[in-house]
Amino acid sequence: MTPQASPHQRCLAEFVGTFALVFAGTGAIVINQAGNGVIGHAGIALTFGLVVLAMIHTFGDVSGAHLNPAVTLAFAVARRFPGGEVAGYWAAQVAGAFAASGLLRVLYPADRTLGSTLPAGSDLQSLVLEFVLTFLLMVVVLGVSTGAKEKGITAGIAIGALIGLEAMFAGPACGASMNPVRSLAPAVVSGHFEHLWLYIVAPFAGALAALPVHHWIRGSLNP
């Protein structure tokens, strides 16, 4: 985070960044369905990875470009992020996600799920997948960040590439959410609350589980 950025500026960056993530990512799913598969699964996965990469490069030096409440919490527990700012970041992330899903509802009123994450198999299967996916995401985030700030160009590439990769192979099975608000907003706006709990629990658990592993590998939670 840049010293010049105020708490309001950081929260605004998180709002805009999370809006972009949910609007582009779930929007790709909605448009793909409306266009009879014109984008395709690979295109959807690539969209998620590219929008995260773009937002990290845009806001990484302002807010850290967390774009994810699980990442924010893990940074706070690791003492890389002020605990007093967690609530503000969460509020901005939730608001950004709901603004994106609300706009998609206006643009595509006939779409039933608005890109909600729904398991293809059992709840347990998706719970484990989402846990592991978020765990790996947080391991990478911790490895390429300084404090709660991303390390230049390599951070955006590494994190965006991993998100695209995980969405590519695990998306058809569990949705590859890795982000509570990415699942919460489309579920609430579309009225599909089934299975939502696992997309809240697994990302938080996976992100927190990455902390001791990073510590064991690096010898410290701090960069």
Image: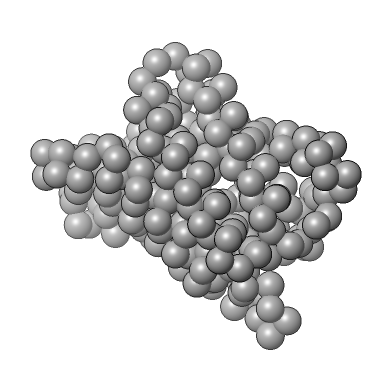
Q: Out of 110 and 53, give the one closest to the viewer.
A: 53
Residue placed furthest toward the front = 154
Q: Quadrant of residue 216?
A: top right
Residue placed furthest toward the bottom = 4
Judge left or right: residue 126 versus residue 128. left
Question: Looking at the figure, which quarter contains the N terminus?
Answer: bottom right
Classify 34 as above or below 80.
Answer: above
Q: Residue at x 59, y 59 (%)?
A: 155
Residue placed furthest toward the left = 36
Could you say where residue 57 lies in the image, as x and y percent from the top left? Answer: 51, 68
Q: Quadrant of residue 175?
A: top left
Q: Quadrant of residue 39?
A: top left
Q: Residue at x 68, y 78 (%)?
A: 2
Judge left or right: residue 192 versus residue 112. right
Question: Looking at the figure, which quarter contains the C terminus?
Answer: bottom right
Q: Residue at x 35, y 43 (%)?
A: 45
Q: Out of 67 and 116, give the one closest to the viewer.
A: 67
Classify 123 as above or below 26.
Answer: above
| Colour theme | one colour
Inspect this view and state whether residue 190 appears. no
Classify 103 as above or below 110.
Answer: below
Could you say where residue 121 lies in the image, as x and y percent from the top left? Answer: 40, 16
Inspect this view and state whether residue 176 appears. yes
Could you say where residue 130 lies in the image, as x and y percent from the top left? Answer: 53, 30
Q: Out of 4 and 212, give the one closest to the viewer.
A: 212
Judge left or right: residue 12 versus residue 193. right
Could you say where residue 107 lies in the image, as x and y percent from the top left? Answer: 19, 57
Q: Out of 206 and 50, give the one closest to the viewer.
A: 50
